[in-house]
Amino acid sequence: MGKSYSCMDSYEKRTLIQAANFDEAYVKRLYKRFTELDVNNTGSLPFDIILNMSEMKHNPLAERIVEVFDIDSDGTISFTELLFGLAKLTNNAAELEKSKFVFDIYDYNKDGYISNGDLFKTIKLMVGENLTDIQVQQLVDRAIISGDKDGDGMLSFQDFIDPTENGQEPKVALPKEIEIPNSGEYDKSELQKLTEFRQQHRKTVDGALCAAAFVRNGKTFTDCTKTEAPDGSAGREWCYVEAQLVGTGFRDWDFCAPIIDYDMLRAKARTLANLKAMELANGIDELAKEERYFKIQFCASRRLNGILARYDTVCGTGAESYNKEIQELHVAIRGIERAIEQLETSKRYIEQLRHKENGLKEQLEAYRKYTTNSHKNCAMVRGYHQSVVGDGIIGSYYDNPFFRGTPKGFIHHGNVNLIWNERVGVDGVPIEAFSVRLEGFLRAPATDLYTFYIEGDCNVRMFLDKEEIMSQGFDNQRPFDKDFGPVTPLALDGRAICNVSLKSRAIKLVGGTRYYIVVEYSHQQILKPYNPLVAKVMLSWSSTLKPHWEPIPSRHFFRGRESPESLQISGLKAKFYSVGILENGAQAFKDSANLVLADIPQRFRGATMIRMGVEGITDDLKFHMNRDANVYVSQPHVAPDVPKTGQSEPFEKSAFKLSVFAVGESCGDEAIRQEQFVIYHYKFKAGNIEIKLPSKTSLVVFIMAASGPEMCQGDVEYLPMTRADTCTSSSSQSDSKACTYGFGSGVWESAPGRLSGQYITRHFGSVVQLHHFHLVPGGGVPPSIVKFQFPDGESETFEIDENLYYNFSKPRMLDWVRIDLVHVSDSKGVEPTTGGSFALYGIACPTAVTEPTNFDSKINIVFTCGASVHESRYLDSGRPKARHDRLFYGWDNMIECKSGTHKGILLDKNKWSIDIAQHGIYKITLVVTATQNIGPISILVNGYEIFGAEYLKNGQSVTYNGAISLENVGSLSVESSSLGLALVEINLTLASQIV
């Protein structure tokens, strides 16, 4: 920093000395000491030389002090920097300069503010291990809250130097005492306040109170120490006693008494007192029982004496012959009494044992509570979640090889690596012929392509998410099963029956997701020429990460779908957000303590809340979730906009609301005002989340892990075609490949040569809630992109790969769905057909209210370019094919329609088509008109010519009436090779329906 001291002239040296406020003699002594340390004559000292000085070595803030001295931040201390730094610590220095120096000690990044982290690091240096991180953080939070005047969560220099309420000094921890050699001119009062936070209240063996802080051999201690004691001993804790006690003892120090755990002492005393109280209560009960017993004996004795007196009065001396018998009775009674006494003694002993048992139970419960609430128990820390540990699968055993009847027993297996040798382990299930169904959930460790392998010695098959992916020896043509029931093994056809080895296709599984798995094994001794009384089955897997297949470990099998993994949120900036628990009375916003939440619906209490400022945020809200969850955004009902996803999809408005109350400064103050907030929600998948929030609006955001369906009650399961369901398709190869087989019970295939523009539609008999679907390609060209269209006008597009199933972005409530095959794979060397089997999974909602599905048995479409009103429900103005209400129709190419030129729309070099809602035979009425002289005209309907050699003049119209079969195709097309021919109107009437 500037010239070195030796290079300055006399005027510059005097100016420097006056600025530093030191006398010249002291400056010369200090400079001599400086040159002795500067062995390289560089004019500056590195940090390590200053830090290794005996006066600085034991100061926890030494490194920070040196960094503050280094004004030009070059990593060294020049003499000028040292002189100006020491000047700030003298008694003659201005209070403002002292405060600025202390402020710079805290300000690590030199940005002019003391942040929460700056204050934490500084105080942690000072207290060392005497306070835990939690205690230090509490101290830091209180200091920030009490000193922050402008509410920005940090302390500016103005906040730092301003006194707090009641004229007190700022409650900010000051640095540890700084000791400067060869000078007694430094003001240490501010630095010595650290002892206020370091008192441990330790006592000596004589009961004297230890000093809060003391110095020994140049080192400051704030607690008892095991260093060398004043008498020369070491290894035992000692301390100096408080000053007010010095003078009455024989020395001013003593050895420290051990630390007493008063919490444990009070707990032990409380437990002992409870035990003694219970013993006294039991003793009182026993005394009461004995008192009742003696009363009964006393009454019995009085009655017996009365009987004997009456006997003597009535019988007299004639009864002396019975004295012997009476004596024997007395002996017997005494024997009975002794037996009763022994029983009473045994009873008391049993009661004592029972009391001891209860005492041990209470002591165990007390220890359990103590260990549960201990700070060493990680399970009690908020945010802690247990690791996911597999709990195996359940095996249902049948006494026949066909899964008929009810299971005879159940066994919990850790995995599917089973061998039965001469016995099954379930009573009534013979090894000679039995079947077992193993059911559970399989959790993929990571997102990857998995291939499964089964090795067995008899008939076996495997289902994953209720899709059959491997089978050997079972007669079941349904690749998707809703209910697993009895089966019929196939007849022997030369297949392997002793050593079965199966391999599945590669299936993409998402890491952390649990998939429903079923393995069915059927054993028949008669089918096995070798080892007939031994049965075995083993399930293995491999992946691209682990190409060598291995048995699936037990840790990946579970008996339930729900995962104990807690919802975890990360990626939020602490400067703008904080995370809390949604509950009544919780602080609503990060920067306002007097705005609290209330009237929270029961279903949302306990959710994870993201707290932000009162005025919201200007940027999008971004964070990461470890699992699927519902994100809720609550905003004032007068807000001008609604929250949206990163793809600008709006949140759905719910029927729930919560309130935000403004209260006074005290917790007991009544609410000043209330504001109602409307709750919006959207379900996100696990991963990175982005939400577009209304700007400059107070918002309350909270998140709840997705726990399952919300609109319909029940389990998500495969939805097979029922008698109440109907379907249509753009075309089909044959009756056995019709659309009815395209939803899991078989395969739908299009007609040969038809690859583009193919679709399949399903109308449900009742409302359903769709969640996901499986796709099994057919024998032709598999589709690579499919598009689902829904009744509400929305659609979703999926790229088909090796996924086991595909999730919709949200549950879909509907009564029909259309699936378009947007793109197919390469068709070289493959039969020119496409299709597959779309197994839909969801929940049937028979009680849901929706509009019933009504097929239009009569369809009338008018073609016009004008805007005039027509009686027809459907109009066509030359637009490309799209959905109109429940119909799909339109042109291959857009037509620039000009009204008023002629009736209808020209067919020139274009094709019009419509997708029908139901297969069958239709009556058709078609009206065309000529816009010029034409002859002969040509009209093709589904590729068939419907006119002969008709000639039309300009403006002349002609009508065609006929019938057309749409039993195997799902669309009707109209085209013409005649120029100047316009399509005016089409009427379709369903004559006979194909069921």
Image (tube, rainbow, N blue to C red):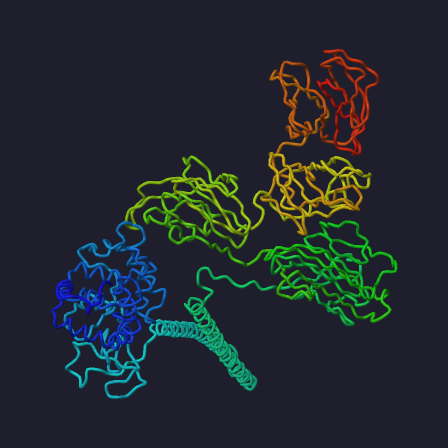
Instruction: Identify the residue shown where x is 32% and y is 47%.
Output: 594
Give the percent coordinates (x, y) of residue 613: 37, 46
Instruction: Identify the residue shown where x is 78% and y is 28%.
Output: 942
Q: Nearer the viewer, residue 392 or 357?
A: 392
Q: State left or right for residue 76 relative to residue 470.
A: left
From the image, which quarter does the C terminus lie in?
top right
From the image, which quarter does the N terminus lie in?
bottom left
Image quadrant assignment for residue 403: bottom right
Q: Nearer the viewer, residue 490 or 85?
A: 85
Q: State left or right for residue 970 relative to residue 263.
A: right
Q: Is residue 547 above or below residue 244?
A: above
Q: Is residue 756 above or below residue 87?
A: above
Q: Nearer the viewer, residue 444 or 280?
A: 444
Q: Is residue 362 visible?
A: yes
Give the percent coordinates (x, y) of residue 658: 42, 43
Give the percent coordinates (x, y) of residue 150: 27, 49
Give the percent coordinates (x, y) of residue 54: 26, 78
Q: Is residue 412 visible?
A: no
- Give the total of numbered labels: 0
Q: State left or right for residue 31 relative to residue 486.
A: left
Q: Is residue 816 above or below residue 289?
A: above
